[in-house]
Image (tube, rainbow, N blue to C red):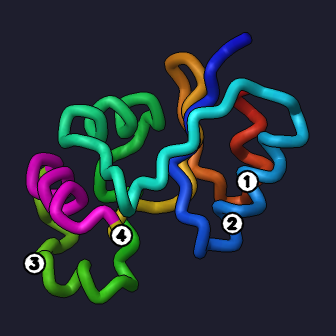
Amino acid sequence: MTLVTIYHNPKCSKSRQTLALLEERDLELRIVPYLESPPSKSELADIVKMLGIAAADIVRTGEDEYKESGLTADSSENDVLDAIVIAPKLMQRPIVICGDQARVGRPPESALEIL
């Protein structure tokens, strides 16, 4: 059985919905409460690579932490990753990883594409 990892925020409805979809499929799940156990900078870089997008594309720009971080549309990949490490609330949620692929669970069903 393949391990499926979900970076999960239980307070987020999309994260809860995505987790429920995964649990329905009787998968081996690794649930990472990323606000309590944030990924390292290298783990984030790997996640971004698996997603096939820029780090800026997983940033929640509406959060107060975004304004406080000093990030802009022109921020470097390195600066964005550093900001997420400092304030994991900036990371889009949930992120689901299966093998060498990842998806942001927005909408929740998009996570099923990599199973």
Mark 2, other Cα within 10 Å: few <14 / some 14–19 / many ≥20: many
Instruction: State which mark lies toward you, 3 or 2.
Output: 2
Q: Amino acid at mark 2?
A: Lys
Q: Which residue is mark 3?
A: 70
Check the image and report above or below for 3 versus 109. above
Where residue 25 sits, quadrant-wise, is top right
Give the mark, 1 or 4, whose residue is nearer the N terminus: 1
Residue found at x 55% / y 55%: 8
Residue 52 vs residue 54: left or right?
Answer: right
Q: Which residue is mark 2?
A: 14
Q: Which residue is mark 1?
A: 18
Give the mark, 4 or 3, whose residue is nearer the N terminus: 3
Mark 4, other Cα within 10 Å: few <14 / some 14–19 / many ≥20: many
Q: Amino acid at mark 3?
A: Gly
Give the mark, 2 or 4, whose residue is nearer the N terminus: 2
Residue 66 vs residue 113: left or right?
Answer: left
Q: CA distance from mark 2 to mark 4?
A: 15 Å
Residue 90 vs residue 20: left or right?
Answer: left
Q: Secondary structure at mark 1?
A: helix
Residue found at x 24% / y 81%: 65
Q: Amino acid at mark 4?
A: Lys
- Contact, mark 1 vs mark 2 (Cβ under 8 Å): yes
Residue 89, numbered label: 4
Residue 36 magenta-drawn?
no
| Range shown magenta | 77-88
